[in-house]
Amino acid sequence: MFPEKFQELEDKIRLTAELMTQLRQEKMHLEQKNQEAEKRIGDLEGELKRLRAERQPTGAPVETLIQHLNTRPGDAQEQALHRLTEILVKEPNNVKALFELGNAYERQGMYEQAIQEYRQALKLDPDFVDAIEHLAFFARKVEPRQRGIAALGTHPVAEKTRVALPCCRQFCAHTYCPASPR
């Protein structure tokens, strides 16, 4: 009986030793993978920082350009136009920059360009009230003289904003305006 028990214990000890060896190898393998993963995370974090640094706008923020447009005449407005255009090259879906570029064109009497920028802003954000109001201004002041007052209706966003606006359908991309004549 004792020799069988000793044999059984020796087998268990041998199996335990084999399992310990296997577990040590797995542990070393997992530690190696962990080090590789930590190195990869460090590399990715460095790459992310580099990409963020590249994405940082090199020019002044849009709000600073707006202040320059409102306070400085002549060359400063042209520089601001240039900077807004640069921002739009980098961020073509920047609705605020599109709107401000339209304002700058409007201030310089370049109404067709202003209308184009307001239209583009509305294509990206159809509920952008400021662009709607500026287009409505053109619809009230400029367009009636050119196309006749009958083309005006009520803008579909007027219910949301509770602002009575003439329809700017001829300027923007609205496909349906319930109040405009057909």
Image (cartoon, rainbow, N blue to C red):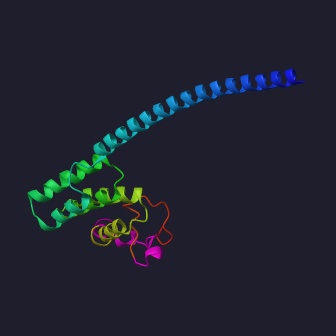
Residue 74: image x %, image y %?
9, 60
In screen coordinates, is 42 left or right of 59? right
Say if 93 sits above or below 156 in the image: above
Figure quadrant of residue 116 = bottom left
Residue 127: image x %, image y %?
43, 65
Magenta residues span: 143-164
At 21% from the left edge and 63% from the top edge, which residue is drawn?
Answer: 66
Figure quadrant of residue 50 = top left
At 63% from the left edge and 24% from the top edge, which residue is drawn?
Answer: 21
**Front one among 181 and 4:** 4
**Front one among 52 and 97:** 52
At 30% from the left edge and 71% from the top edge, which residue is drawn?
Answer: 137
Residue 174: image x %, image y %?
45, 61
Say if 89 sits above or below 170 in the image: above
Residue 163 lies in the magenta-colored region = yes
Outermost front residue: 2
Residue 160 lies in the magenta-colored region = yes
In screen coordinates, is 181 left or right of 13? left
Q: How many marks?
A: 0
Say if 178 sits above or below 19 in the image: below
At 90% from the left edge and 24% from the top edge, which residue is drawn?
Answer: 1
Figure quadrant of residue 79 = bottom left
Residue 117: image x %, image y %?
30, 57
